Amino acid sequence: MENNRPKRTVKVVLRSGPLALKIVVSLLIVFFIMALVALRWVHCGIQAQTRDLLDQAAALEYANSQLEEKQKKVGSVQGIQDIAQEELGLVDPNMVLIDPG
């Protein structure tokens, strides 16, 4: 069965709106653009802070590992001698020092 109805065409007509509506829409667009720029600025700041904190964390982890190594040495005789020699400039009385100068 064929449909012999005539085809309908639809026309969309855009009428210009009131000036107040155009102003409100324009202001909303400007507001949203400014909000996106502000969010991007905040995002970049947060990323910079994150990088700084990660750098600080890495430095603290390194310092912590150094302190753990020192803590392991403290209990032994050799560790006490190393600390006395390195940090206090003390030497073993049985050691012979040769001064090249």
Image: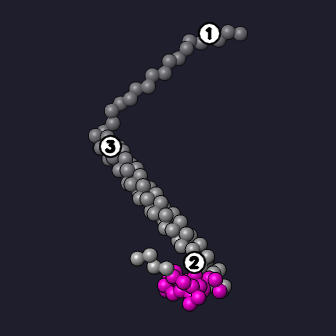
Residue 84 vs 67, above or below: the answer is below
**Helix, strand, or loop for circle 2?**
helix
Q: Which amino acid lies under the numbered mark 2 shown in the image of this protein?
A: Leu
Quadrant in the picture for residue 42 = bottom left
Category of crowding for the residue at label 2, using alpha-carbon neighbours closer than 10 angstroms: few (below 14), some (14–19), many (at least 20): few
Which residue is drawn at the image coordinates 57% and 77% (left, top)?
Answer: 67
The relative height of residue 84 versus residue 14 in the rendered view (above or below) is below
Looking at the picture, tell me which residue is in the foreground, 61 or 24: 61
Asked whether 37 or 83 is in front, the reply is: 83
- Check if mark 1's residue and mark 3's residue have beta carbons within 8 Å: no
Q: Residue at x 47, y 60 (%)?
A: 51
Is there CB contact under 8 Å for labels 2 and 3? no
The residue pinned by badge 1 equals 4
Quadrant location of the N terminus in the rendered image:
top right
Q: Secondary structure at mark 3?
A: helix
The image shows residue 61 at horizontal and vertical percentages of: 56, 70
Task: Please give the range of residues in magenta.
Answer: 77-97
Closer to the observer: label 1 or label 3? 3
Marks 1/2: CA distance?
Answer: 92 Å
Residue on which the image places disc 3: 26
- One can see residue 52 in this view: yes
Q: How far apart in space, not on screen, are marks 2 and 3 (Cα)?
A: 61 Å
User: In percent of the image, x 45 and y 79: which residue is there?
Assistant: 99
Is disc 3 surrounded by few (<14), some (14 to 19) or many (20+) residues within 10 Å? few
Q: Tell me the residue that label 2 is attached to.
A: 67
